[in-house]
Structure formats: structure tokens, C-alpha cells
Image: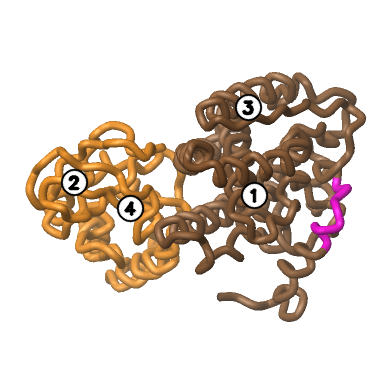
Amino acid sequence: MVKLAEIEAALDRVPDPELPVSIVELGMVVSAALDGGTATIRLLPTYTGCPALPMIESDVITQISSIEGIERCHVVWAYEPAWTPDRISESGLDKLKAHGVTACCGGSTVTLTTSAIPCPYCGSDRTRLDSPFGPTRCRAIHFCEACRNQFEHMKPRG
Amino acid sequence: MTMQTMLANPLASIVLMHADDLLMLGHVQSDWTGLAPILEEDIAASSMAQDDLSHALVLYQYLAEEFDLDPDAIAFDRDPADYRCCNLTTVPDEFDWAVSMCKRWLLSTYTKLGLDRLALVDEGDLGDRCARLRDESAIHVAHLGAWMIRLGTGSTESNERMQAALNLLAEEAGMMFEPPDLGFESDEGFCCGRGEMFDEWATLVGATLSEAGLQASFTLPDQAARGGRRGEHAGHFSEQHAEMTEVRRAEPATAW
């Protein structure tokens, strides 16, 4: 008999292809259900245009299908609830910060003006948005006037 | 279910309008990848084109599930006259950055309002999808609006070039609000409230233009107006459509 806990543990082993966190830590998993030998995993895209989604889907299917007793695994991409950075876990936030990526709130970052998101390197809030379009679809680029480092910030809802 | 059933459905027609706008804009705009004036904007423009195509896909996937069709078939296999994209998406920018910027800003502002309305009228899957897309679309509107102001107030040359771009696009921008063929007389009460949406759009656009030191006047097309929303596309559409569907026609089973 497969336990849901085994599925959850397997999901926590699926990494985000671009960041040092799992999809569970990122808050991408909405639900995992088991019906006989069929597992259905509902996932939230952090951003709809993310080209990593097919890779994540395939990694989830590989991990879940390797559990003894599971014959099939379906991944459903969901839009409700909408993913926001608020879904990232404490451990996820810590790992991202160590990687130079912030994900706190800090108000609207969708303008080109000062955004005052605390710098992950020096903690200063003398920071500004450089571009809402960073290295991946879910990350914006900010700049710290205090330590003059660039850092990335997980985009909030627009 | 067939493509014709989908095309005859009023709500599907509204969804298709937005999906086709995004498909066409994303396709054309991706020509700029590697060519934008500065690196950050090259990345931004390519990212927005990527968003536009993925947003189109999310809407085509909804229609595909509703009408039991293949999303790629909806995107690429329709007759040109069955595309609902507005005239503005098919105006070529001739690699003039000002035209590209204005076109994207005018259309994104419109798209965000349209998605917002779809998110309100539908309490199910379509509404959830549109709410998600609207939030991402808001980032485009904010970014492009800030650039409208930056270029409008930058130098005499940048102001003149932006003004020239607006003059080129203003008439076709109004045609975004061309009444679609929904199979019944008036669309005023259905889903969008065309006139009300036009007023809201014109107010938003006007506020940014005023801050940017730019002028444009837009007209809500009357019920008799006919253009891309009714499948009557300008000549440029044929070229874009032929290019966009070339791989699909050559190799229908192609997958990435």
C-alpha cells in the first residue's frame, strides 16, 4: 500500500532545474492524489511561459513512477490558486537567499522606480529594479546601491 | 466537435481574439531577438514575446479542451479568414524600435483589460487562466508604459520618433475594438462591453501619453467596421501567416 507521505517525499526530491530548491519548497505542488495505482499531481507554474515546465513534469513522473505500487502518474498544471512567492517555504527562502535570489514581498516591483527590496548580500534597502525580465521568466533583476551587486528577485503577482 | 463549432461560439470567439493577438504579436516580436537597441531591452522584448506565445497557448489549450481539438491545430491549421487577430498586430514595424514599442504597449494595455473581463465573467477554468495571464500581462503594461514615458521625454529625436510611431498606429489601434462577429446583433452587453472597455483603455493610454509628452486620438469603430476581428486581414497578415505556419505545413507531426 503506497502512502501519500511517500509521494510527498518523492516530490520533494524533484529539483527546480534552475534553482537550488525542490518544487515542494517552491510551493509548486497543490495536491497529490492516489486512486488505485494512479497518482495525480496538481502543479502550479511559477510563470506560464517557463520553458522548464515540461522538464519538471517529466521529472515528477519519473520520481513518482519509481515508487513501488504506482503504475501511472498524471501531472495537471493548475491556475488556481495562482502561484505567488508567498508559497515558497522557509527552507526554500533560505536556500534562495544563499543563492543570491530574494523572494520577499517588498511591494510592487513592476515599475522602473525604487523598489527597496532588502539586498540578499548586504541587507541594505537602497535597491532598485533594473529589469522585470531576468534570466528566467519568474525572476526580475535588482541592483543594490550600497554594495553595488546585482541580485535576482522572484517576481510577485503583477 | 469541430473547428466550426468553436468559431461559432460567442465566448470562444472572444477568447480566440486575444489568443490570436498574442500569437501574432509574439511571433512577429520574436524577430527582434538579438536586435533590440540595448541588451536589457533585448532580453525584455524576447521575454515578452515568449510570454505572449505562452499566453496564447494557455488560451488555445482551454479552447482545445472545451471543443475537443488539438491546440496546435487551432493555432496553425485554421484558414487565414478564421483568425481573429486585430489589424494592429499585422502592421509591420520595419524594425523601427519606436513602432515596436508603441504597438506592444497599445496592445498589452488592451489585452490586460480583456483578460480582466474574462476573469470576471467566467468563474471556472477560463477565469482562472485569464486571471493568471492578466497578472503577467500587467508586468508588460508597466514596463512598456515606463518606456513610453522614458522615450517620450528623452530627447527631441526620441520624442519625434515615438510621435511618428503613434501617428502610424493610432487608427489601427482603435480597430482593436472592432466589433467581432459573435453571431448576434449587438455585442455591447456581451462579455466585454466594447464601448466601456474602449473608454477605460483610452483613459489609461491617455494618462501615460500625457506624461510622455505625446499625443494621439483614438476612435471607437462603429458596428459596420470590418477588419481582422472579422477575418478581413490586411496584406501583411498573409505573409506573417505563411511564415508562421511554414514548418507546420511542411512537417505536420513536428514536435520540439
Report x, y in % for residue B64.
67, 53
Q: Which chain is brown?
A: B
Mark number for residue B99?
1
Q: Which residues are magenta?
A: B231-238
Give the CA distance from mark 2 to mark 3: 39 Å
Tag 2–tag 1 contact (CB < 8 Å)? no
Q: From the viewer's perspective, is A25 left or right of B147? A: left
Q: Quadrant of residue B24?
A: bottom right
Give the CA distance from mark 4 to mark 2: 17 Å
Q: Give me the residue at 24% from left, 63% from top.
A: A10
Residue closest to the eye, B155 or B127: B155
Label 3 secondary element? helix
Q: Quadrant of residue B167?
A: top right
Residue B235 included in the magenta stretch of the image: yes
Label 4 secondary element? strand
The answer to whether residue A106 shows anywhere in this view is: yes
Name the amino acid, label 4: Arg
Q: Which residue is mark 4?
A: A139
Residues marked 2 and 3, same chain: no
Q: Which residue is mark 3?
A: B201
**Which mark lies nearer to you, 3 or 1?**
1
Tag 4–tag 2 contact (CB < 8 Å)? no
| Label 1: how many Cα within 10 Å (few below 14, some 14–19, many 20+) | many
Q: Which residue is mark 2?
A: A89
Q: Earlier in the sequence, mark 4 or mark 2?
A: 2
Q: From the viewer's perspective, is B52 left or right of B226? A: left
Residue closest to the eye, B208 or B140: B208
Q: Give me the residue at 16% from left, 60% from top.
A: A99
| Label 2: how many Cα within 10 Å (few below 14, some 14–19, many 20+) | some
| Label 3: how many Cα within 10 Å (few below 14, some 14–19, many 20+) | some
